[in-house]
């Protein structure tokens, strides 16, 4: 580890846990109740809310957002509204403009059109915007970003290099959950059911953790969530979070899955606070996640679906 990084990064502040936006098509009432539980029980500091995967899903959750935000803020959570990750239609552009103009909450910009609209205004750059080098990082900070969520595929060495250049500004890492890998204008989830994107009947709701995709040999290797391609494996950086915090990473994101996310958050909080060992924490997570194996390959600069122990 570079001593320059250790000496230059502020490590006195407590690492913060964040809960990313729900990527899947969960029923709106279930999502509302999920956030209510997070507000009352989960030791997370920041909660991201909003539809980032498919704009067709957004109208179902929108009526509940003010109530959800009020409950979260009353519980002491910071609320961030996440924008769509792929803006294509005139309707989507109009809705994005309205969110930027009207939202009283901080916004997470998940594509360049949102970043353009937010220029000079405090915001967060989401993980769907590729930030791979120091110049890009610096540009977004100068543009108004208060925090940048790094892509999942960066190695530990690449993260360290970026931290050397960011002057102790806020950096967020994806630490748990299936990670989004790619976006498409088409919906393979609908296509797999013989449906078109416009007439999808919201079949993605049948797969609350994403639909597994198998090789010709029957081995699962990816997951599909509407227009989104995700990892089959579940990203798990429990063993790496304390080291990353010492390097200067300030926020650690947990992506919601259909598991006990309160217990997941408690486990990561305990690990960051030094109250459990990695082995103890991994035992808890292993008992919670049974739909796919863990992986941390990207961080260790090997294949992303590998687990380096």
Image (spheres, helix red, strand yellow):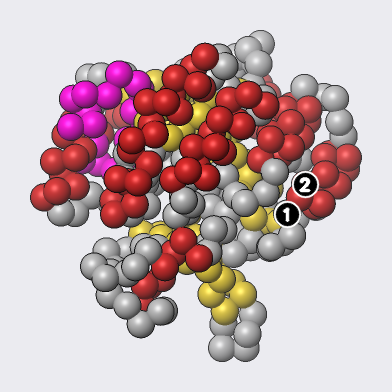
Residue 287 picture location, percent across and down: 82, 51
* Residue 229 to residue 48: above or below: below
Q: Which residues are magenta?
A: 98-114
285 displayed left or right of 182: right
Q: Is residue 7 left or right of residue 190?
A: right
Asked whether 101 or 222 is in front, the reply is: 101
Residue 234 drawn above or below residue 261: below
Residue at screen point 29% across, 45% down: 59
Whether residue 132 is visible: no
Residue at 67% across, 26% down: 41
Answer yes or no: do the residues labelled 2 and 1 have beta carbons within 8 Å? yes
Disc 2 marks which residue? 285
Specify the farthest residue to the left.
Answer: 90
| Left or right: 192 in relation to 215 | left
Q: In the image shown, does 155 or 31 lie closer to the viewer?
A: 31
| Residue drawn 28% across the image and 75% down it | 196
Identify the image quadrant of residue 89: bottom left
Which image quadrant for residue 99?
Answer: top left
Crowd around label 2: few <14 · some 14–19 · many ≥20 (10 Å): many
Q: Position of residue 270 (x, y in %)?
A: 78, 27
Q: How many marks?
A: 2
Residue 102 in picture, x, y percent from top left: 21, 24
**Nearest the camera: 84 or 172?**
84
The residue pinned by badge 1 equals: 289
Within the magenta stretch, is there residue 166? no
- Label 2, secondary structure: give it: helix
- Of residue 267 and residue 237, the one placed in the foreground of this image is 267
């Amino acid at each position: 580890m570079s001593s320059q990084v250790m000496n230059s990064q502020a490590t006195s502040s407590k690492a913060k846990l964040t809960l990313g936006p729900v990527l899947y098509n969960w029923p709106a009432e279930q999502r509302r109740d999920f956030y209510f539980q997070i507000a009352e029980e989960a030791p997370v500091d920041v909660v991201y809310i909003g539809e980032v995967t498919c704009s067709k899903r957004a109208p179902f959750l929108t009526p509940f957002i003010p109530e959800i935000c009020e409950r979260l803020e009353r519980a002491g959570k910071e609320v961030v509204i996440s924008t769509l990750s792929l803006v294509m239609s005139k309707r989507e552009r109009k809705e994005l403009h309205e969110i930027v103009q009207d939202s009283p909450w901080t916004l997470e910009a998940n594509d360049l059109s949102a970043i353009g609209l937010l220029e000079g205004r405090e915001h967060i750059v989401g993980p769907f915007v590729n930030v791979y080098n120091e110049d890009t990082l610096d540009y977004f900070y100068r543009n108004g970003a208060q925090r940048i969520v790094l892509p999942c595929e960066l190695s530990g060495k690449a993260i360290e290099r970026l931290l050397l250049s960011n002057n102790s500004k806020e950096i967020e890492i994806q630490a748990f959950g299936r990670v989004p890998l790619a976006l498409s204008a088409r919906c393979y989830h609908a296509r797999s059911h013989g449906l078109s994107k416009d007439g999808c009947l919201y079949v993605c709701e049948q797969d609350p953790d994403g639909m597994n995709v198998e090789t010709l040999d029957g081995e699962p290797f990816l997951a599909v969530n509407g227009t989104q391609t995700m990892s089959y494996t579940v990203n798990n950086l429990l063993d790496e979070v304390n080291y990353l915090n010492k390097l200067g990473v300030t926020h650690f994101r947990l992506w919601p899955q259909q598991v006990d996310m309160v217990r997941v958050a408690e486990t990561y909080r305990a690990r960051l606070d030094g109250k459990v060992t990695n082995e103890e924490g991994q035992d808890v997570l292993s008992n919670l996640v049974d739909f796919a194996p863990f992986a941390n390959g990207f961080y260790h600069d090997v294949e992303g679906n590998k687990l380096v122990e």
